[in-house]
């Protein structure tokens, strides 16, 4: 959910907003990318964790990276794409269609018959 909030906030950030919004945006995106990096490192070591860790550093609010609006805009759009990609990837990895299929009725009946025979 935090990735969706971060992606929507980044898209909103493409519009003119007060300076405070961009500071809040840094906090949201940094937290979302740090969480995604941690999650990626736990699930798939050596995968995209380094990528989201780098993005978290780029958006970190404590030592901000100052860039102009024309430079931030494509970075924001790319970050939105990466956040959505990671969300879709994680959803596919945990979806039921990627797990083992449920046993068939005949397999369940055979198992039950074997248990009775023992």
Image (spheres, grey):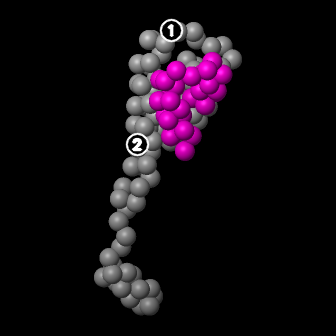
Query: Percent from the top left, x then y, of residue 24?
Result: 64, 26
Q: Would residue 32 be visible to someone looking at this image?
A: yes
Q: Which quarter of the picture shows residue 20?
A: top right
Does 66 appear above or below 88?
A: above
- Answer left or right for 95 relative to 62: left
Q: How many marks?
A: 2
User: What residue is rendered at 44% in x and 18% in y?
Assistant: 73
Within-10-Å neighbours for mark 2: few <14, some 14–19, many 20+: few
Residue position marked by numbered label 2 in the rendering: 89
Q: Would residue 45 be visible to someone looking at this image?
A: no
Residue position marked by numbered label 1 in the rendering: 68
Q: Which residues are magenta?
A: 1-30
- Answer left or right for 56 relative to 99: right
Does 78 appear above or below 115?
A: above
Q: Is residue 10 magenta?
A: yes
Does 62 appear above or below 88?
A: above
Within-10-Å neighbours for mark 1: few <14, some 14–19, many 20+: few
Query: Percent from the top left, x then y, of residue 42?
Result: 55, 39
Residue sitting nearer the eye, 85 or 48: 85
Q: Main secondary structure of the magenta part?
A: helix
In which quadrant will I find the C terminus? bottom left
Residue sitting nearer the eye, 55 or 15: 15
Q: Which quarter of the picture shows residue 104?
A: bottom left
Cα distance in 3D space between marks 1 and 2: 31 Å
User: What residue is rendered at 44% in x and 52% in y?
Assistant: 94
């Amino acid at each position: 959910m935090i990735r969706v909030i971060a992606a929507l906030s980044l898209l909103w950030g493409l519009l003119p907003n007060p300076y405070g919004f961009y500071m809040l945006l840094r906090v949201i995106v940094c937290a979302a990318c740090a969480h995604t990096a941690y999650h990626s490192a736990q699930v798939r070591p050596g995968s995209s964790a380094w990528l989201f860790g780098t993005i978290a550093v780029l958006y970190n609010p404590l030592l901000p990276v100052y860039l102009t609006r024309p430079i931030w805009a494509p970075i924001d759009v790319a970050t939105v794409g990466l956040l959505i990609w990671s969300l879709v990837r994680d959803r596919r990895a945990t979806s039921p269609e990627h797990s083992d299929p449920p046993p068939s009725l005949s397999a369940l009946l055979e198992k039950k018959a074997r248990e009775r025979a023992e």
